[in-house]
Image: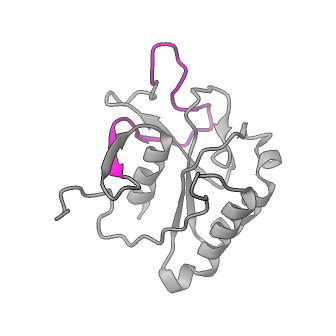
Amino acid sequence: DGGAITGVAPKSKIAAVKVGDEFGDFLQTDVSKAIDWCVNSSQQYNISIISLSFKTLNYANEFTCSLFTPTIGSSIKDATDSGIIVVAGSGNQNLTDQFAAPACLKEVISVGASDDNDQFWNYNSFGEDGTNRNNNLDLLAPGVSITSTNNDGGYAISSGTSFSAPHIAGAAA
């Protein structure tokens, strides 16, 4: 588009790894294989950061997280042991005691969404959607009305922690 929109780290290179099918469905083993590919390809493609943003039905705290993420957790530990930073969105259910897995893992930088007032993102006055958080949330990043690319080759505006995590990955780059 001629550079009308610039990301957080415009000089960074991105190795995009798709794990979901055309409906966005995936298995933990798919994510684990993608993380393993990043670790095994880190030298060739200079991969130093992995940003994870995907919908999950697994929510946990720091004590129960490993129960929901045995496969992904092992791959993430391998990544961080290799010096790769792993960032993940905390989820969008407005939970105050749990995160979306794998953001709940101690090896992961968990990222919540903030609004334009630097407050926790809360989608509506009923508290039905918003950033998941507890005392272990690592960082907040912009996550409201973020312009991003869409599957049609254009742009769309959306909100949530899946838009916050890449801000932190970009800052780390």
Where is the C terminus found, in terms of image quarters?
A: bottom left
Question: How many marks on residues?
Answer: 0
Principal SS element in the magenta part? loop
**Residue 118 versus residue 62 in the image, above or below:** above
Residue 164 on image: x %, y %: 44, 45
Picture residue at 62% right of the left edge, 25% below the top? 96
Picture residue at 46% right of the left edge, 28% below the top? 120
**In the image, farthest residue toward the bottom:** 44
Residue 87 on image: x %, y %: 55, 54
**In the image, farthest residue toward the top:** 126
Picture residue at 44% right of the left edge, 29% below the top? 121
Q: Which residues are magenta?
A: 123-149
State the image quarter where residue 136 is shown.
top right
In the shown orientation, is residue 3 left or right of residue 158?
Answer: left
**Residue 20 versus residue 106 in the image, above or below:** below
Tell which of 83 and 131 is nearer to you: 131
